[in-house]
Image (cartoon, coloured by chain):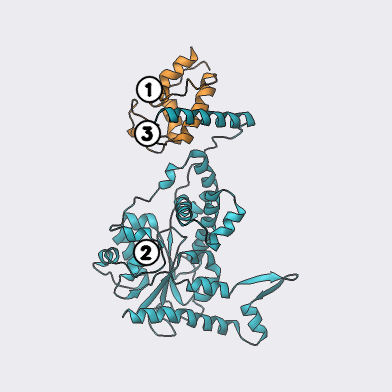
Amino acid sequence: MTGGVTDGVTDGVTDSATGEAPGIVILGAPRSGTTLLRRLLDAHASIACPPETFLLGAAARFLHEETFAHGLRIGVLLGLGYAGFDQGEVLGRLREFTFGFLRDHARAQGKPRWAEKTAFNAFHVPAIRRLCQGHVRFVCIHRHGLDVALSLEELVQKTGGYVDELHRYIRQYPEPLEAFARAWIDSAGALAQLVEDDEHALAIRYEDLTRDPEGTLRGVLDFLGEPWDDGLIERALGGTGGVGFGDWKTYGRATIDSSSVARWRGLPLPVRSKLAALCNPTLERLGYEPVPVIEARAGESDEDARRRYELGLMLNRMKRGKPKTKS
Amino acid sequence: MATALTKTELKGFLAQHARADLDSIKDDEELFSSGVIDSFAMIELLMFLEKYTGTRLGPEDIDLDHLDTVNGILRFVELKKR
């Protein structure tokens, strides 16, 4: 971790508004294990992390600005500025409004410290930084980008639609896996930048959390200044963690395992190579090995492409005559 | 193509496209029927074999008896080159 932004409001150990330990914001690209991490932290005796509240994404939209009329920036902070409200005051009011729900929820749970996790917050990182940085601790969870793209594809197939944050990528890129890979690149890149800039931000990897849950969680709790809690993992997996929004798959699991790691290896080579070429710079930035890019169809002619299509048709005929084939 | 397709070359090609680690697959074990290589990979293999043998494969060639194992593929290539 490098850098540090505290803007004089908190030292990252106590919340200046309450004198208590600062809130925790979990961030990660959707399908990166954020719900698993939420359940684990919520099982800690001192931390209350409700199912997805969408609070920070909504606050980010409140802060949305755009350029209008020959470069004029418009938005709430700028508009209220003309009405005499200092930006710091507006942000402070919004922060208090947002954090207040989370603080009250933690108190209702009998816990001193709140945490917040909503997967799609990863698409609003700049605004969330503006609102929260210097007032919370960030725990960012990364997962291999090709696995995220695959899992997002599975998600939209099962749910039958796109949330707004993904739909804008789909509108731009007609191949869904490419759209999801680009969504991952943007969100994971924003989180990497956050961790590089802010000493109060920690990055972990889904692959490490599933391979070594206790070791990884001990690191997270140490960063948060919280003691290890015996039985935490068992409690997290044993309970429902409260009914609410979040990943449904994690609730069906009684153990943490690595069965969803490296599923991307099953992608057809041309697809894998195309996604790898896009994702490798971000993968390497996050400490992952780059995926080999094999230009299997480099220089392919139109005739080759037609021949591949013909062979595919003949292969289908063979499969029809050989029912034992699986694919 | 004058040279014979070696087992090493074939396995190297298949390794790029397989879903599983080919080191654990025996030369007479099923590749396609077992799901080790999928339809996309099989088409790549057919394209590879056409270029290697300099022949145009027909429906009669595209048969699991020829294409489902490493040894079967090697025998098929030898047959097509005659």
Residue drawn at 48 percent across, 47 percent down: A290
Give the structural element (helix, strand or loop) at label 2: helix
Residue drawn at 38 percent across, 60 percent down: A248
Which mark, residue A211? Answer: none
Between the C-alphas of marks 3 and 1, the distance is 14 Å
Task: Identify the residue under disc 2.
Answer: A37
Nearer the observer: mark 3 or 1; the answer is 1
Q: Colour of chain B?
A: orange
Using the rendered view, name the quadrant where residue A266 is placed: top left
Using the rendered view, name the quadrant where residue A28 is placed: bottom left
Circle 3/circle 2 CB separation < 8 Å: no
Between the C-alphas of marks 3 and 2, the distance is 35 Å
Give the structural element (helix, strand or loop) at label 1: helix
Same-chain status of marks 3 and 2: no
Circle 2/circle 1 CB separation < 8 Å: no
Q: What residue type is disc 3 on?
A: Leu
Which mark, residue B71? Answer: 1
Task: Identify the residue under disc 3.
Answer: B22
Query: Which quadrant is the C terminus of chain A positioned in?
Result: top left
Indicate whether A297 appears above or below A155.
above
Whether residue A53 appears in this view of the structure is yes
Indicate whether A153 appears above or below A70.
above
Q: Which chain is painted in cyan?
A: A
Residue at far top of view? B82
Between the C-alphas of marks 2 and 1, the distance is 48 Å
Position of residue A161 measured from the top left corner of the image (x, y, whole percent): 51, 57
Q: What residue type is disc 1 on?
A: Asn
Position of residue B35 measured from the top left corner of the image (x, y, whole percent): 38, 36
Label 1: chain letter: B
